[in-house]
Image: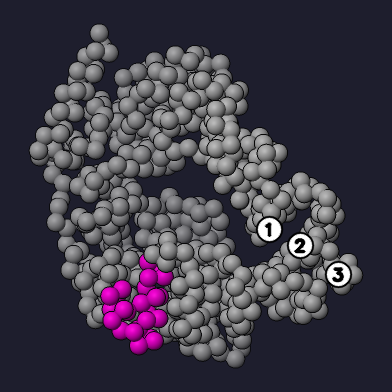
Amino acid sequence: MKFIVYFLLLFAFSAWADQPGNESLQAVRSLPAPRLSADNESDFIAAQRAFRANDAEKLELYAKRLKNTPLEVYATYYQLRLDLESSDIGKIRSFLSRPEDTPLVDRLRGEWLKVLGKNQQWFLFDAEYPRMLYADTELVCYALQSRTRFQKMVALREARELWFSGVEQPKSCDVLFSSALYAGVIDEADVLRRLRLALEAGRVSLAISLAGILGGNYADLPAALRSAAADNDRFLENLTQDNATESQRIAALFALHRMAKQSPGLAATRWADVSGYFYVSEQQYFYGWLGYEAARNLDERALEWYKMAGNTRLNEQQLEWRARAALRAQAWFEVLESINAMSEQQQRDVTWLYWRARAFHELGRHVEARNLFVQLSSEFHFYGQLAGDELAVAPVMSETKAVYKPSQHDIDTMQALPGVQRTLAFYRMGLPGDALAEWRWVLRNFNDRELLAAAEIARRNGMYDRAIGAADMTSSMHDFSLRYLAPYRSALQKYIREYDLEEAWVFGLMRQESRFASSAKSGAGAAGLMQIMPETGRWLAKRLGLKGYRHTLVHQLDTNLRLGTYYLKIILSQFDGDHVLALAAYNAGPRRATGWRGSQPLEGAIYAETIPFDETRDYVKKVMSNTVYYAWQFNASRRSLKERMGVVAAKTADAQ
């Protein structure tokens, strides 16, 4: 009876949600849930502990207490996960038939499918797999295994596409690969191609195992790879014209590439001694990697080596760094050629759309440049702002005023949703991983109005990082007061004044560092709003004369702001007020930021674009972009992004 009543209510709720004026609920198909109490949260923590202790009896007790609450789904999930292989199939199916208002349903489906695939229970697997929303490679291979029962060659040809990976694939793929090798769907050339991908990715063990498959003319390849991996230089010293078999050349190219990662110059010197032992295609292959590693090391010989790569096929990363090397050299024709060599999808990336436009502009192709600048200038990101600057307009700024604010009714209705309640509860319980998983799941199908309502709920509950994330996802309806939140503003003022820092710049940095989550902690140990590293914190505390400082204090609001702003002042002074260099130094260290400068002055955007560390490159661009938005919000300096990026001075003689 309860089952029937539930579905009648669900039908009525769905019909009401579809009525005009209720658009904020049309992407949600879950009944509002009872509010969670402190006791519910305590019971959940106890249930979680029982699950981790494999205590089924205690888990059952707390599962009963959580019945008819939004957290009941977790207790049921824990019960099923205690022994998934032996769990009642009816109970599993009942769980999987729940409304998809939590990531746990799809998570359990994936875990159960892996059990079914491992045990080759294909009838059950085939019935459930089509409902899987986010299948990983392991599941894809199990699905292909099942298909080999009816469409063997079709399934093996699909498996071949998974073969071309430089990293190890799940064990569920092994049986497919073995069958494909036996059937000739994967041939010797395919094995060599994957072996090369593995070596490029530094997966030596995988490459050696692939070499073992080859045999025949490549019987000595596993030993050659082991020798090259053990001592690159010694292996190359022993290479001669007489012993340079194909296996030895493959291993030598691997050794040379490894050497180039550490020192392109040293690799080039060693290459000069042995290059004559290689075919032209092999020489060009190595020059492609030498150019790439040189570009990432900001070596000015990179373009020369790229040119010597001839028509060898370059991957996405090699092409990107060819374009970056050309940017640093101000070789605009080479910039354009490098972008033209990219795939269509890669060319559509906003990074390369902008630099294509700049190349057109520098080469005098102004109409083509303007068309691309106009296209980009309506977008809210670093390149959209730079494109607007090139047009001498600020179109993105005219749209920063919110055109929609959720009503209290919208907020209340959404806050009653089970997924939102679980998110808030996990946040209160100090379970950020579970909170984030639920939050992402709740947001995944939301429209702009729903995203803004969710962002406002997160803001009101102090989940500033989640508020920003939700507001960032809108496509046409925006609220920049949510997208660029400014909490703790009053607490920051005294340090802004004391150290003479630009408020918008500091907020731009904090947004990127922690999104204002005071408990934020990086894998490297950086902590708090301004992500202070332990060693840096101790050094700063000593300079400031903070008695009894310990790193746990870095999560305190005032301490974190004081240390972070003081450090910003130090590095900004060290770099003569250059905000771009100071940001690179804040993220990657002053020595690296200095070393990344050119032998000639560099446009700030080019300096940022050619930072070798992916994280730092992204960081500098985003903080500078954030700064412009915060300056407008604070009604402060309205300098353009291009002006703020400025020109980065060349290396001084002592920094060469």
Give residue 249's position: percent from left, percent from top: 79, 65
CB under 8 Å between callouts 2 and 1? yes
**Mark 3, residue position:** 239
Give residue 348's position: percent from left, percent from top: 39, 64
Query: Which of the marked residues, 3 or 1, is nearer the chain's N terminus?
Result: 1
Tell me the amino acid under the disc marked 3.
Answer: Leu
Quadrant of res 275: bottom right
Colouring convention used in this rendered image of the protein: one colour
Left or right of 267, for residue 171: left
Tell me the distance, in whole angstroms, between the alpha carbons under discs 2 and 1.
Answer: 8 Å
Give residue 205's position: percent from left, percent from top: 74, 50
**Count of all numbered marks drawn on residues in the image:** 3
Tell me the distance, in whole angstroms, between the alpha carbons under discs 3 and 2.
Answer: 12 Å
Query: Which of the marked residues, 2 or 1, is nearer the chain's N terminus?
Result: 1
Q: Nearer the viewer, residue 310 or 231?
A: 310
Left or right of 22, for residue 468: right
Q: Residues within 10 Å of mark 1 (few under 14, many from 20)?
A: many
Task: Say which element carries label 1.
Answer: helix
Tell me the amino acid under the disc marked 1.
Answer: Arg
**Image point 30% across, 84% down: which residue?**
366
**Mark 1, residue position:** 196
**Image point 66% across, 51% down: which residue?**
190
